[in-house]
Image: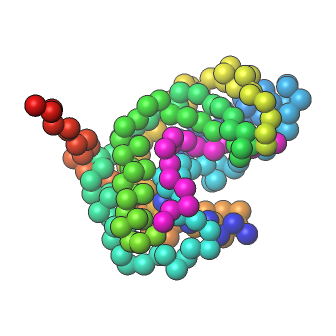
Amino acid sequence: MSQALFPGWRPSGGEAARLAPVVAALRDAGRGHGLKLQARRPDQWHATLCFIGYDMQHAVTPALLGAFAQAAARIPPHRFSIERATYWPQAGAVVALPFDCPALQALCDATRDAIRRCGVAPLQTTTQPHVTLAYLDRHLPPQDWLDDIDCGSAGTFLVDGFELLFNPGGRYDALERWALTGAELPRPPEQGTLL
């Protein structure tokens, strides 16, 4: 069993329905290239905002839940669209990468900071938000056929909240959910000029 714990975003039912044809196209194209693509189920589609770790249920404290609530209050609801699908050989994952979305990256960073403020070192931070759609064998060469998959037809996805997700094995249970209520993105710090 996975026992994974992380804050994450999941598509709504309607959004998942628009993503399903992209996954079907991936499966068909993979088969056409002699590959066995293991598609994830729609209820498994999510974007990990920051990965806390495995067997970390003890980290779910009132302080952590409060820190996530503070993070949600700073980030506004926003939308993203998928730019392309790509293959990550280390994990064997076929992922959907959004077009550059500063608000989504800010949400990843805010959840990372919330975790750290509670004295927990996340196992992995998210520097490139993505949705894992399927798996192939690990360490394959680049999969150029993925460039031909039309991801734009999936439309836009609304990120208006996130959940603390726990994977007891084969599914993701939401332990808590927060709505995004920020008015605008925090401005990056400006560096003063020297002389």
> The C terminus is located in which quarter?
top left
Q: What percent of the width, then of the height, locates residue 1?
A: 73, 69
73 to the left or right of 169:
left
Q: Residue at x 15, y 37 (%)?
A: 192
Residue reaching furthest to the front: 195
122 in the magenta segment: yes
Q: Nearer the viewer, residue 183 or 129?
A: 129
Q: What percent of the width, then of the height, locates residue 18?
A: 57, 36
Q: Quadrant of residue 114?
A: bottom left
Q: What percent of the width, then of the height, locates residue 66?
A: 33, 71
Seen in the picture, residue 131 relative to 161 is either above or below; the reply is above
Total labels: the figure holds 0
The type of colouring in the image is rainbow
58 to the left or right of 22:
left
Q: Residue at x 55, y 41 (%)?
A: 130
Q: Visible in this render: residue 172?
A: yes
Q: Residue at x 56, y 25 (%)?
A: 153
133 to the left or right of 31:
left
Q: Visible in this render: residue 165?
A: no
Residue reaching furthest to the top: 148
118 in the magenta segment: no
120 to the left or right of 37:
left
Q: What percent of the width, then of the height, locates residue 96?
A: 59, 36
Residue reaching furthest to the left: 195
Q: Residue at x 74, y 22 (%)?
A: 145
Seen in the picture, residue 125 relative to 150 is either above or below; the reply is below
The span shown in magenta is 121-137
Seen in the picture, residue 185 relative to 116 is either above or below; the reply is above
